């Protein structure tokens, strides 16, 4: 199953260029394929077997937008396992309070 049309791919490439990829995740096509993926795997994380609430792109959307809606590129993951796949997304929450050794 692949819901990617030429028009959607063009939009997605534009959103990636504009750093507005969140719009893709709000699309009806993403919501539909996400639900299909979770249902297909019984909402079980493919890494640890716990309840999955996330759907992970094996090939990143920014690198391979043409695969963004392809079932073979998607797998359900729990939040913990998904965060392990994307540590860069958590980096902003772990910033040092002080940028240098001198604090005052």
Image (cartoon, rainbow, N blue to C red):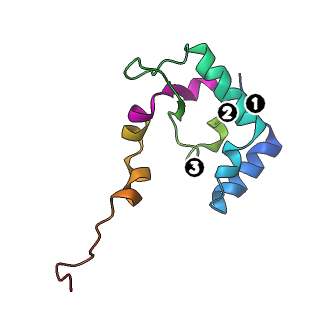
Residue 15, how many percent across, how many down? Answer: 69, 56
- Label 1, residues with CA under 10 Å away: few <14, some 14-19, many ≥20: some
Using the numbered discs, state the Cα–Cα distance from disc 3 to disc 1 in whole angstroms.
Answer: 17 Å
- Label 3, residues with CA under 10 Å away: few <14, some 14-19, many ≥20: some
Q: Mark 3 points at which residue?
A: 62
Q: Mark 1 points at which residue?
A: 3
| Position of 84 relative to 20 (above/below) | above
Residue pictured at 80% horizontal, 37% vertical:
5
Residue 64 is left or right of residue 45, and the answer is right
> Regarding mark 2 in the picture, which secondary structure is present there?
loop
> Regarding mark 3 in the picture, which secondary structure is present there?
loop
Q: Mark 2 points at which residue?
A: 69
Q: Are marks 1 and 2 in contact (CB under 8 Å)?
A: yes
Tag 1 or tag 3, which sits nearer the N-term? 1
Quarter of the image with the N terminus in it: top right
Using the numbered discs, state the Cα–Cα distance from disc 2 to disc 3 in whole angstroms.
Answer: 13 Å
**Residues in magenta, as a range:** 71-81
């Amino acid at each position: 199953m692949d819901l990617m049309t030429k028009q959607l791919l063009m939009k997605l490439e534009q959103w990636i260029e504009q750093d507005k990829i969140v719009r893709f995740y709000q699309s009806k096509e993403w919501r539909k394929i996400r639900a299909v993926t979770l249902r297909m795997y019984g909402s079980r994380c493919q890494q640890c077997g716990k309840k999955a609430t996330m759907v992970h792109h094996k090939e990143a959307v920014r690198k391979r937008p043409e695969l963004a809606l392809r079932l073979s590129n998607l797998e359900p993951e729990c939040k913990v396992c998904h965060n392990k796949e994307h540590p860069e997304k958590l980096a902003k929450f772990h910033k040092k309070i002080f940028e240098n050794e001198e604090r005052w």
